[in-house]
Structure formats: C-alpha cells, structure tokens
C-alpha cells in the first residue's frame, strides 16, 4: 500500500504542477538551498528571475542500532539471519531508536521586490520507534533466552502517521538590512495514524515455560484503514513555519522552525491496559472432546476481552513532530564553502543531528557537497550531494546517504536520498 | 527536445524508480519460543462424559451406572384381538296374509226350489208347497239327503294362491230357518288347484234359530283365490205348522284366520319378515376372557344378499356398542329387491366404529364373556300388487368388523410370554487388555408394567459377552430362575407399576471387558385367579431395563485405554521444530503411560509420540485411604521438522493409555474429586513471517 500511494500521489502532484505555482517549506539544510544561497538567488538579489517551481522528494531511514543489512532483510522480505541479529545486538543500548521519513512536494516562489511569496503542497510519511534491547531480543530471538528472567520491553514507543499539506507563506528582506524573515501556515489533512506507547512491559518467563507473566502498561491508538488513491482522511490540522536568515560577506546564517502544529485526529481506536497478565496455556475444557474446541476463536477481540484491555474510539489531538534547523555557512572562497548545522525533531524519538558539509564548486554551475552527520535516528553518516544548474533556468540536485550501505551494511546504519528539480523563471 | 523537457523526463524517471520499489514484503526470522500451549484438567466425570453413566456415592466415591433399556414387549393381548365375520343367512321367519270373513246364505225359498227339482215326488211336492205357503203354516216332514250346489267364493283380494303353514277355517252357520237341520256337510274346494278339497266339515244338529261354529285346521293346505263352497248333504228336521217365510235363510259365515304361508302369491301386508337377535362371539381371543373393549379404530361393514322380490327394510343394532357420544350403534337401511343372477351383494355399506365401547358380556343382563349382542330385523311394507314370496326367500347378511384396533380391553387375562435379547454394554468400549476386577457388582432388572395385570417375572439367563467370544454367565440363586411378582398398573388414575429385582455380588461378570449383555426372561401375566377387572391399553407395555451399577473400587493391571479419533491438525508452517513437555499433575492413584500414534487416511501409522516414562501415581494416604498429595511428572516429546510434517498430515490419532492402579494387588477406590491436570509447554523454533 505504501509505495502505491506514493506513486499515485506523485502523479497527482505532477498534474497539479501544471496549474499551480505552489510551494512548501524551504529547508535550509538541503544542498540546493545552500547552492542557491551562494548566488543569493533565493534572497531576491538577482534581477534575473521572478520565481521558481520545484519538485522535491526525500527519503531517509536510520537507526541507532538496526543495521542496514538487517533493515534490508526486514524491508525487502529477506531472511534475517542470526548474524544480522548479532550485529544489531552488538549495537544495542538500553534505549534505541529508528526512524523513517519520506517527503514529497511541489513548491513555488514568486519574487516581487523584497518580498517572496511561497506556496506548495506536500505529502509526508513519518515513522519512528523507540525500543528497549529486551524488546528487540524478545521479538527477534524469542523469549526462551529469558527463561527464569524478566525481559523489559519498555520504555518503547512507536509513531507512524502520514498527512498532506497545503502551504502558504511569505518572506521578506528587511529593509536596508541583510535579514530575511519568513513564515507560513500549513493546512493539514491527516491520513493514517498509529501510535504505541509502552510505559511498562515486564515479561517474565518461568524457567520451565509453564507460565508467562506480562506486566503491561501501554496505550495504543490507530486510525481506521482507508482505500483509494489518497489515504483516508482521519483528521485535520494546522502547522506553522518560521525562518530567519542573515548573510554577510563571508557567512550565511539560517534558522528555521518547521511544522510546529498539530493534527486533530478523529475516530481513533485507542487501547489502554495497565495490569499484570498471566498466561499458562489455552484451556481446553474437555480434552476428550477437543475436536469441538475452537482455537480459531482466539483473535484480537477475544484477547482484548479476556485481558480486560480498555478499548474505545475517541478523537485525539497530537503534536506533529516539528523540527528546528540551524546552520552557519563559512564562505572560504568562491569555490569552497563550509556549512555546520544542526537539526532537532521533537515528539519523534529523535536525537539532535549535527552535520558538517563542504560546498565545493567544481564548475561555475556544478557543486558537490560531501557531509558528515551525527545524530538523528542514527550515528555517524556520510552524505554526498550534488547540484547542477542549467543556464540558470533549470536546476537539478540530489543527495544520498548510501556509502555505509554499500560498503559495510552489516555494521552500519542509515540510508537516505533526496532529489529536487527546480525551474527558474 | 528542450533541456527543460529532458530534465523533466529525467527527474520523473528518477522519481518513479525511487517510488516504484518493491512492495514491502514480510521478512522472516527464527525465534525460540518457550511458553505453555494448552492446559486441561480431567476428573473422573470428564472421563465418563455422560452424567447418566455414573453417580456419586455417599462417601463421594464414583459408582458406574449402566442402565440399558431392553426392548419393550407387549403381551399380545390387543394385537390379536379380532372379531370373526358375522355371517347370517336369514330366511323369512313368517309370511302373514290378510284375511276376512265371507258371508253366504241359503234361503228357505232356495231350498224349496231345489226340492222342486228333486226326482223324488214327495220332495218336489213339498218344494212347491213351501213356495206356495208364504206367510202361512205348513207341516214340514223330515227331509233327508238334501244338497246345495257349489257356490263360488272369491278370495283373490287376499291371495291368488298360497301354501298355508298354518291357518284356521271357521264356518259359522246361523239357522234362521223355521225348522232344525241335521247332518249339514260343508265342503270348501279349490276351483282348479289340486287337490281341490280344502275343507270338509259336518254340522250334526242345528236347531232352528240357533248358530253353530266349526273350525278346521288349514295347515299344509294349498288354497287358491277361486274357491267353491258346497253343501253335499243336509237333513231337515220336520215340524208341524211351520210358518213359512221363504226369505228365512241359513246363513254361513266363512272365515279364514291366522293365515301363515310358506309361499304365496299375494299382496302381503306390512310385516317383519326377519327377526334375529343373537350373541355374537369374538374370534381369536387367544384365551382371553373379555368383558369390555374400547375400539380406537374399527369399521363395520354390512353386506347383504337378498332374494326377496320386494324391498326389504332392515335394522342392525348393537345395543351394547356405545359410541363416544353415548348412543348405541344402529344401522337402518333398506335392501332393494334382489336381482336374479347377480353375483354382488345387494347392499354394501361401511360404518365407522371408532371410539365405540363394546360390552362383551352378551345380551343385556347376561353376564357372559367375549360376546356382543346384535339385533337384526327385516321388514317389508304392504305390497301394492301381488308378489310371490316363499319362506325360502332369504337375507344373506355378512357383518364384518374391519381394521379393529382396540384401545382398551378389560377382563380376565392370563398369558405367558418369553422375551430375550442382546444389548450393547459400552462401559469398557475403549479399554483393552490387562486385568480388571471390581470389588462388587450390582445387577438389577427394573420393570415398568403398563398393563393392569399383575403377574410374575423370572430371569432365565443373564450373560455378558466380549468381542473375543468369551462369556460369563450370571449364576445367582437369588435372581436366576426365581419368579418375582410383578404388580399391575392401577386404572384410576392410571399409573404403571414399577418392580425391581436385583442382586449384589462379587462376580467376574465384568472382568472380560464385556461388550454385550444377553438376557432371557419369562413373564407370566395373570395371577391365576379369574378376576375380570384386569385391563390393558393399547399403549400398555412392559418396559424392562437392565441396571448394572459398579462402585469404582477396582484393581487394574495393564489396562489399555485406547481410542482413535479423526484429527486435522492445522499447525502454522512457522513452527519449525521443538520439544513438547507434558506436565502431568496427577491426583489419581493410577500410573499411566501415554502413547500417541498418528495415522494417514488409510490407517497406516506415519509417526508417533511415545515415551516410556510413566505418569506417576499419587500416593494413597493410609489414614484416609484417599489421595492427599498430588504427583507431578514431566515427560518430553521431541518433534523435529519431519515429525511435525507427519503430524500435520495425519488424518487419525490413535492414543493409548496404559494404566495400573497402585498399590498393585489392592482395591483402589476412585473419588469424584480426583483430578489430573495436564499442561503442554512448547519449546518451539518459530519462524516469524
């Protein structure tokens, strides 16, 4: 379902592209943005264009412990070997994280004097999970290793959602200064929503396996599944973007707050339990008449009833994981710039992410930008970006985080890709 | 192609490649799961399943109860009840003809004129003298051997011809002549029919102004409608100075009375020609002496063959057959004149006899048995024209009671009936081998007698059998061959009577693991005293049941409890292999070795789960003689991938439990609170999809 929706949404936006001059967020950590900053094109310093139209997408997945080879097995339907699991276990800490983001959008800008109007539409998929070592070990190796012991499955969290947004914004260069202040508002259509929060999950397996006990305190919520071209709408929301840029002779500075907002999710199925559950086997009332025993009568609903898990349908308001970006660019020469920056995403089990990026212009209109990052959902990663402009009318940029994946997937984490095509008018 | 377009195409392709990656497929990995799978608890009640197959004794021990309804049987007292067709060929009992009186007179003038024709001179002179002496006196001398010519008498209005079986001819002569008469001979003759003489009588002396009567029997006479009356001789007694009145007459009054004929061609008056009242006996009563029956269902069919040339009106009544609406049975019908050469009945009709109560004591007031009283009357109306009837005309009537289904009978009933049979004994259906001894066995035969007849029952034989052909015959002098009285059901209110005969014994009857019980009983219905208040309904039956109760105090060694059940295991293919551990928490004083054999559809064993390790028995507390402390045993079964496949492919499961009571050689009593708890823990390699 996931890729089909992406494809469908992609073509939809291609259609929209022909009629709209829209724009989504401007992200200062993206290489094409940094490329354009060099010429101050974006800031409206140039009289050569009136606006831009960009189609961009980004995909990123990373983890503090889940290796690329493990992920490959998990995502491609392969077999997860014991070695893969061992490699992950070796990286495990008490608390671990993994996240996935996918963004696809169309953004348009229109410059008039010192003012730039920005509009766009976008689609966002976000998944993050925070999990304990024991949760991983129990899930991927079973509970036998915990015979006579307790596996601590908490704290663990899972967030997954997707939404579509319509963005409208404006930025303006402050008069007679080198500051640009911008802001915008996103109108959000909530799609799918899933959330699990295990506050306590103590799984005790008796030595001989005769009894299994689970002390569980958890919340879970999920939206109804929909079918169709677009994900079913399960809520609406608003988000705010703010950005500030300053530039000087040999430096540039950007700060941005993105997607600060919420989604009011409707009709969310929520489950809550805070109790201790003992399981000592499915009881067969009369083993001599066992053929009449309906094992297949056990399903989610019967478990919910049996274990007194509260289930209800309710409307919930949730923050959208918003991000805070900040970077500083040192302009060493016309051919070489260095960027340092950081990013933090709240409500998403995300660790602060730091990066150092070198912008090197191989030619006048061709830039490469290797970067070293640390944090986020992963550890250290290498990123390689490139931007090519065609006669100042068309610009193509992209970046990948794949060296680790290609070289030592069993020992590394993280994979990502960005693409952007911009038409300059 | 412009650069812009090329860039757009390139970007689109890249995006498609990026987006069109494979559908997320489910990864797989192996886990090792250790968890309880199933658990169950078995008490002796669960094992026995059927709650009617046991009861709890006062000390909470279990008593096996086997109650097998034997075939109910009837005493055949209603099944064979029937009424033989009632066939009567009834001739005309009598034919009555009308009769009247004929007057005939002979005046003195006629006598005088006859004298004038005489050959004797004196007579002729006297004749003339009389004719000429009207109203004057005349001396009339004695006259002898006078006669009168025949006078025709027409009685065709009565009959044209008849053969009289009885009848009286009365001749009354009134002598109004002025002289006396002697030796008057009177003859009555058929005009043409032979023999002509019907009657010949003589009046010896009839004084003047007197009347004399003579009656003569006409039985056996043939008489026709055209008769002639004559006086062949008459003597006149002379007298002086007789006042002559030529109109004075000798008056004859001829009467034919009380005519009954054997045949006649006549106009018959209305009369009953058949009157038949009889007690009709039942047929096939098989020695029963019945006083009464109520018919649940029956029909009465009346078939009549009539030879009468006239319409016969008949009524057939059963005065003691009372309908549900309290009316006696009466059929009033008519039979058209018989058709010669006809082969079929002249009259056929069926009457519904459902619900009738039939008094079988015969004629009202006659206290007999097996008879009902019937009344058949045939009647003809006065014929409009002469018809020929003879007493040989008959009514051939057949009355048949069909489809008789008595609902109730009452009377004296005495009957011997043997019944025997064989019934399954499924208490040990799945046990084989070994030795089994029970401390004692109670055997009883219960009877529910729905007949209002007391009597006795004798158990001739009770025997157990097993599939190997082994038999054990019950030998108990208190039960076998001893007639036990059976009470009869009461009538108001109706209540079947229960009787039980039984015995308790330490018998090896069950030691052969019997699968059948055969029996033979003799039932004597009736007490030998003729009491006529015994009764039976159509639903009455004698329902015997065999009751065997066995206190579960037993000594078993090497008993194999075995059964085969159809299975269709549906293991997830995620399960790779593992070890199943059976944890048995035993509260029975029995040790057991469990084996399971998996078979394919053809019955071939494809795999098995066996372990010689026994589930250990719980020890019996010597003080209370009961189990106080349970015993836990863990038995493991290794299941590799091949075995898992075999189990998953199995169609049938044969399980065997070999058990022994412990301590060996001692009787062990099983109590209701004994249980054994099973739990299966799986240590399973599970491949997650």
Image (tube, helix red, strand yellow):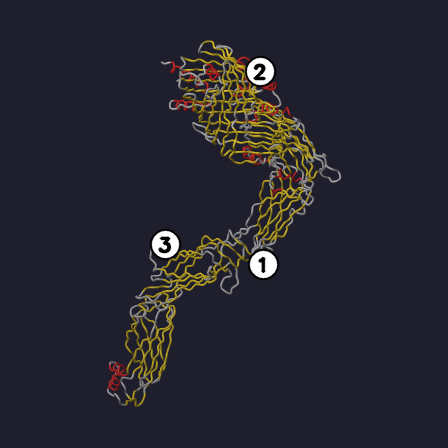
Q: Which residue is mark 3?
A: B344
**In the rendered image, the vertical position of residue B54 relative to residue B610, given as above or below:** below
Q: Nearer the viewer, mark 2 or mark 3?
A: 2
Q: Which residue is mark 1?
A: B530
- Residue situated in front as seen by the camera: B668 or B13: B13
Give the secondary structure at mark 3.
loop
> Is residue A4 visible from the viewing direction of this image?
no
Whole-angstrom CA distance, mark 2 to mark 1, is: 111 Å
Give the secondary structure at mark 1.
loop
Residue lying at the far front of the rendered structure? A176
- Residue B357: horizontal and vertical position, in percent? 49, 59
- Residue B418: horizontal and vertical position, in percent? 58, 47
Mark 2 nearby-residue class (10 Å; few <14, some 14–19, many ≥20): some
**In the rendered image, the vertical position of residue B374 relative to residue B652, given as above or below:** below
Circles 2 and 3: CB atoms closer than 8 Å = no
Whole-angstrom CA distance, mark 1 to mark 3, is: 46 Å
Q: Which residue is mark 2?
A: A411
Q: Quadrant of residue A90?
A: top right
Whole-angstrom CA distance, mark 2 to mark 3, is: 116 Å
């Amino acid at each position: 379902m996931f890729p089909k929706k992406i494809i469908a949404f992609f073509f939809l936006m291609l259609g929209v592209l022909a009629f709209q001059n829209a724009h989504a967020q401007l992200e200062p950590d993206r290489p094409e943005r940094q490329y354009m900053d060099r010429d101050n094109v974006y800031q409206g310093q140039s009289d050569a264009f009136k606006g831009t139209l960009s189609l961009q997408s980004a995909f990123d997945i990373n983890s503090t412990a889940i290796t690329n080879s493990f992920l490959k097995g998990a995502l491609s339907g392969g077999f997860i070997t014991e070695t893969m699991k061992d490699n992950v276990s070796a990286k495990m800490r008490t608390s671990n994280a993994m996240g996935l983001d996918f963004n696809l959008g169309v953004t348009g800008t229109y410059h008039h004097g010192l003012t730039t109007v920005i509009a766009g539409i976008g689609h966002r998929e976000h998944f993050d999970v925070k999990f304990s070592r024991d949760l991983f070990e129990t899930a991927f190796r079973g509970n036998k290793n915990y015979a006579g012991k307790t596996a601590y499955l908490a704290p663990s969290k899972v967030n997954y959602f997707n939404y579509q947004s319509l963005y409208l914004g404006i930025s303006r260069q402050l008069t007679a200064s080198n500051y640009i202040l911008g802001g915008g508002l996103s109108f959000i259509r909530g799609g799918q929503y899933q959330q699990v929060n295990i506050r306590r999950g103590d799984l005790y397996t008796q030595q001989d396996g005769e009894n299994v006990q689970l002390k569980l305190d958890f919340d879970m919520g999920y939206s109804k599944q929909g079918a169709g071209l677009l994900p079913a709408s399960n809520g609406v929301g608003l988000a705010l973007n703010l950005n500030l840029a300053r530039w000087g002779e040999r430096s540039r500075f950007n700060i941005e707050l993105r997607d600060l907002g919420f989604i009011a999710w409707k009709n969310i199925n929520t489950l809550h339990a805070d109790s201790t559950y003992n399981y000592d086997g499915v009881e067969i009332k009369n083993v001599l008449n066992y053929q009449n025993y309906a094992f297949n009568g056990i399903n989610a609903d019967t478990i919910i009833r049996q274990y007194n898990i509260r289930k209800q349908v309710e409307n919930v308001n949730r923050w959208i994981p918003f991000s805070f970006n900040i970077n500083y660019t040192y302009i060493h020469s016309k051919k070489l710039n260095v960027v340092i920056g950081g990013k933090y995403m709240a409500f998403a089990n995300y660790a602060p992410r730091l990066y150092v990026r070198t912008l090197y212009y191989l030619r006048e209109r061709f830039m490469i930008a290797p970067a070293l990052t640390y944090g986020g959902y992963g550890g250290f990663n290498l990123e390689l970006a490139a931007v090519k402009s065609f006669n100042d009318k068309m610009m193509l940029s992209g970046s990948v985080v794949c060296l680790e994946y290609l070289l030592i997937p069993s020992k590394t984490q993280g994979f990502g890709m960005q693409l952007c095509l911009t038409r300059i008018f | 192609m412009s650069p812009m377009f090329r860039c757009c195409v390139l970007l689109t392709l890249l995006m498609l490649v990026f987006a069109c990656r494979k559908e997320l497929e489910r990864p797989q990995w192996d886990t090792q799961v250790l968890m309880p799978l199933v658990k169950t608890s078995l008490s002796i009640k669960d094992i026995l399943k059927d709650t009617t197959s046991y009861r709890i004794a006062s000390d909470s021990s279990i008593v096996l109860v086997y109650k097998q309804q034997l075939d109910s049987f009837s005493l055949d007292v209603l099944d064979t009840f029937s009424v033989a067709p009632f066939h009567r060929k009834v001739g005309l009992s009598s034919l009555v003809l009308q009769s009247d009186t004929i007057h005939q007179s002979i005046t003195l003038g006629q006598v005088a004129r006859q004298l004038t024709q005489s050959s004797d001179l004196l007579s002729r002179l006297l004749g003339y003298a009389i004719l000429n002496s009207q109203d004057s006196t005349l001396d009339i001398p004695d006259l002898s051997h006078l006669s009168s010519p025949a006078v025709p008498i027409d009685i065709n209005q009565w009959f044209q011809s008849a053969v009289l079986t009885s009848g009286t001819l009365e001749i009354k002569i009134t002598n109004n002549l002025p002289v006396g008469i002697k030796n008057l001979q009177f003859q009555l003759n058929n005009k043409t029919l032979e023999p002509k003489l019907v009657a010949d009588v003589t009046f010896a002396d009839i004084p003047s102004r007197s009347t004399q009567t003579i009656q003569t029997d006409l039985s056996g006479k043939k008489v026709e409608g055209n008769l002639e009356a004559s006086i062949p001789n008459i003597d006149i007694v002379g007298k002086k100075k007789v006042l002559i009145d030529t109109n004075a007459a000798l008056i004859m009054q001829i009467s034919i009375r009380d005519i009954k004929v054997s045949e006649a061609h006549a106009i018959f008056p209305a009369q009953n020609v058949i009157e038949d009242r009889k007690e009709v006996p039942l047929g096939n009563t098989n020695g029963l002496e019945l006083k009464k029956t109520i018919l649940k269902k029956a029909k009465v069919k009346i078939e009549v063959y009539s030879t009468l040339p006239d319409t016969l009106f008949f009524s057939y009544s059963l005065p003691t057959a009372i309908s549900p609406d309290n009316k006696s049975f009466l059929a009033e019908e008519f039979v058209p004149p018989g058709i010669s050469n006809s082969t079929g009945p002249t009259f056929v009709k069926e009457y519904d006899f459902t619900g009738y109560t039939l008094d079988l004591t015969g004629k009202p007031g006659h206290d007999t048995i097996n008879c009902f009283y019937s009344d058949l009357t045939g009647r003809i109306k006065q014929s409009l024209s002469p018809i020929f009837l003879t007493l040989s005309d008959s009514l051939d009537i057949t009355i048949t009671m069909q489809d008789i289904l008595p609902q109730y009978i009452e009377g004296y009933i005495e009957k011997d009936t043997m019944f025997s049979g064989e019934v399954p004994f499924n208490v040990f259906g799945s046990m084989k081998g070994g030795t089994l001894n029970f401390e004692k066995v109670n055997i009883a035969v219960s009877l529910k007698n729905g007949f209002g007849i007391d009597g006795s029952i004798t158990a001739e034989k009770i025997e157990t059998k097993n599939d190997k052909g082994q038999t054990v015959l019950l030998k108990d002098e208190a039960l076998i061959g001893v007639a036990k009285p059976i009470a009869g059901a009461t009538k108001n209110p109706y209540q079947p009577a229960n009787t039980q005969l039984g015995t308790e014994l330490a018998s090896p009857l069950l030691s052969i693991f019997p699968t059948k019980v055969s029996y033979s009983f003799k039932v004597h219905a009736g007490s030998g005293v003729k009491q006529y208040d015994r009764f039976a309904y159509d639903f009455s039956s004698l329902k015997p049941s065999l009751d065997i109760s066995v206190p579960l105090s037993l000594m078993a060694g090497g008993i194999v409890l075995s059964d085969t059940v159809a299975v269709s295991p549906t293991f997830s293919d995620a399960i790779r292999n593992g070890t199943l551990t059976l944890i048995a928490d035993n509260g029975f004083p029995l040790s057991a070795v469990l084996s399971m054999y998996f078979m394919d559809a053809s019955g071939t064993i494809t795999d098995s789960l066996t372990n010689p390790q026994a589930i250990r028995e719980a020890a019996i507390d010597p003080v209370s003689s009961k189990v106080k402390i349970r015993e836990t045993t863990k038995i493991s079964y290794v299941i590799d991938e091949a075995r898992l496949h075999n189990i998953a492919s199995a169609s049938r499961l044969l399980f065997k439990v070999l058990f022994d009571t412990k301590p060996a050689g001692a009787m062990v009593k099983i109590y209701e609170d004994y249980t054994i708890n099973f739990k299966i823990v799986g240590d399973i390699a599970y491949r997650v999809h």
